[in-house]
């Protein structure tokens, strides 16, 4: 009996020592990746100025905005006690695309994804998601509370600008916001679907791959980061995940999946699982040979834009 007690004490002591060592690491990872710790963080600037592709995307997006500056209406809404900011580009259409950027990105980043929607006959809304750009907020909730924000944005452009149909274009984590909005009980009929680039099956699964790339220890740091998300935002990332939401959307929602064969975060195997789980009666999957995560259009511009335009030509 005393031997078992000693072994149990050693195991408990080892666990406590491991948690004492890894908790500060997890806290730093969480605050670095998912918390806006200063007003300058995640502002309206290029998130990766040392990445040539990111800089080109940024500059091309700015050029598109400058060509269409006369079409901009500056917008502001309040939701969940936060002031949120956006820009509406009016092309005289009766349907609108709301571009939902990924983590770290403001509405300026979203300009880059607008050209195919202009060609396809859409008005365009770009937004600073909560805790990004000019919008208020401190915590990223992995799409859960952000989905309530985008429902409020959709209501605004439907009622104020008479858009009869509204779609989302989500990049990475932005897709989570769109999917959670589409599966909500109060999702309106005018929200018709989603184009997703690089959506993941669950946040813990993709965040683990990010940590591996950053050469961070995985266990128990990953689990502690997920706990920090729940502690600060109430989001249960093991329950609220895209592969669950995509089974709960309306079957008449139209979904276009855009994926890269070389994506190391939303890997092809998991991407196919998400597509197969989708209950949409009108869904399409398009693969791109070149380009990393969130960098598909810059590497396959004509194919990328054509996939979007053709998808909506048959609407």
Image (tube, rainbow, N blue to C red):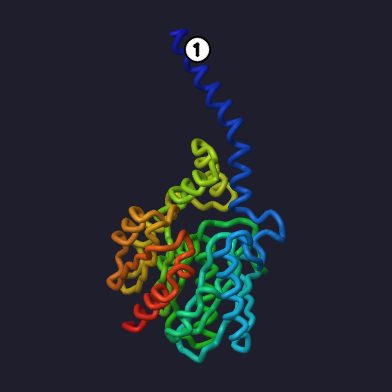
Q: Nearer the viewer, residue 148 or 43?
A: 43
Q: Which residue is mark 1?
A: 6
Looking at the rendered structure, the number of numbered marks drawn on it comes to 1
Which quadrant is the C terminus positioned in? bottom left
Q: Quadrant of residue 54?
A: bottom right
Q: Nearer the viewer, residue 102 or 296?
A: 296
Measured from the top left, where is residue 122 in percent x and y?
A: 46, 84
Measured from the top left, where is residue 87 in percent x and y?
A: 60, 79
Which quadrant is the N terminus positioned in? top left
Which residue appears farthest toward the bottom when viewing the image? 92
Q: Is residue 5 left or right of residue 37?
A: left
How packed mark 1 is, by other alpha carbons closer than 10 Å (few <14, some 14-19, many 20 or more), is few
Q: Going 56% across and 84% down the picture, which residue do you hit?
A: 89
Q: Going 40% across and 66% down the picture, which residue do you hit?
A: 183
Measured from the top left, where is residue 75 in percent x and y?
A: 62, 79
Give above or below for 209 relative to 118: above
Give above or below for 145 relative to 10: below
């Amino acid at each position: 009996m005393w031997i078992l007690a000693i072994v149990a004490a050693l195991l408990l002591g080892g666990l406590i020592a491991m948690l004492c060592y890894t908790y500060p690491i997890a806290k730093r990872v969480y605050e670095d990746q998912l918390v806006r710790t200063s007003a300058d963080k995640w502002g309206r600037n290029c998130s990766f100025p040392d990445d040539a592709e990111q800089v080109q995307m940024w500059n091309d997006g700015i050029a598109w905005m400058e060509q269409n500056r006369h079409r901009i209406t500056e917008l502001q809404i309040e939701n969940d006690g936060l002031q949120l900011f956006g820009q509406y580009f009016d092309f005289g259409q009766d349907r609108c695309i709301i571009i939902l950027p990924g983590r770290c990105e403001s509405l300026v980043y979203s300009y880059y994804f607008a050209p195919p929607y202009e060609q396809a006959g859409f008005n365009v809304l770009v937004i600073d998601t909560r805790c990004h750009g000019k919008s208020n907020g401190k915590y990223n909730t992995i799409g859960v509370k952000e989905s309530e924000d985008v429902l409020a944005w959709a209501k605004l452009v439907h009622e104020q600008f008479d858009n009869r149909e509204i779609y989302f274009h989500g990049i990475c984590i932005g897709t989570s916001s769109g999917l959670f909005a589409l599966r909500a009980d109060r999702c309106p009929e005018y929200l018709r679907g989603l184009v997703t680039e690089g959506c993941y099956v669950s946040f813990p699964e993709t965040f683990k791959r990010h940590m591996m790339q950053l050469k961070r220890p995985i266990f128990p740091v990953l689990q502690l980061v997920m706990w920090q998300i729940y502690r600060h935002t109430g989001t249960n990332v093991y329950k609220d995940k895209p592969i669950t939401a995509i089974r709960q959307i309306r079957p008449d929602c139209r979904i276009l999946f855009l994926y890269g064969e070389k994506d190391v975060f939303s890997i092809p195997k998991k991407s196919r699982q998400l597509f197969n789980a989708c209950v949409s009666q009108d869904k399409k999957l398009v693969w791109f040979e070149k380009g990393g995560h969130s960098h598909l259009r810059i590497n396959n511009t004509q194919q990328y834009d054509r996939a979007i335009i053709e998808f909506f030509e048959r609407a």
